[in-house]
Amino acid sequence: MLWSDPRDEPSQEAREVQRRLRRTALLIALLALVGAALVLV
């Protein structure tokens, strides 16, 4: 890739989808942690 080539950045929509997926994955991990804690107690 040449220095003069335009940056290969994701579109605004793709960034929004990534952000939403990351937030959803975090929420699922948190729920799994709480669920495991409730099962073990």
Image (cartoon, helix red, strand yellow):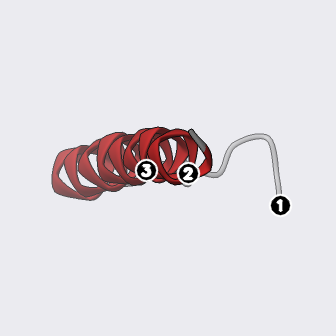
Front disc: 1 or 3:
3
Front residue of 40/20: it is: 40
Which residue corresponds to mark 2?
36
- Residue at image coords 55%, 51%: 36
Q: Report the quarter where the C terminus lies.
A: top right
Residue located beneath label 3 in the image: 35
| Residue 13 picture location, percent across and down | 16, 54
Q: Does the CB distance between marks 3 and 2 fall below 8 Å? A: yes
The quarter holding residue 30 reads top left
Left or right of residue 20, residue 27 in this image: right
Relative depth, front residue between 35 and 2: 35
Determine whether the residue tagged by mark 2 lies in a helix, strand or loop. Answer: helix
Amino acid of disc 2: Ala
Residue in the image at 34% along x and 42% along y: 27
Q: Looking at the image, tell me whether mark 1 or mark 3 is earlier in sequence order.
A: 1
SS at circle 3 = helix
**Between residues 40 and 4, which one lies in front from this camera angle?**
40
Q: Which label was assigned to residue 1?
A: 1
Of 15 and 25, nearer the camera is 25
Per the model, the C-alpha gap separating discs 3 and 2 is: 4 Å
How far apart, in angstroms, are the residues tagged by discs 1 and 2? 47 Å
> Is 29 on the left-hand or right-hand side of 18?
right
Type of amino acid at the residue the image marks with label 3: Gly
Residue 10 screen position, x and y as percent: 40, 54
Q: Position of residue 37 (x, y in %)?
A: 55, 39
* Residue name at image x 31 percent, y 46 percent: 15
Of badges 1 and 2, nearer the viewer stands 2
Name which residue lies at 69% across and 43% down: 4
Is 21 located above or below residue 37 in the figure? below
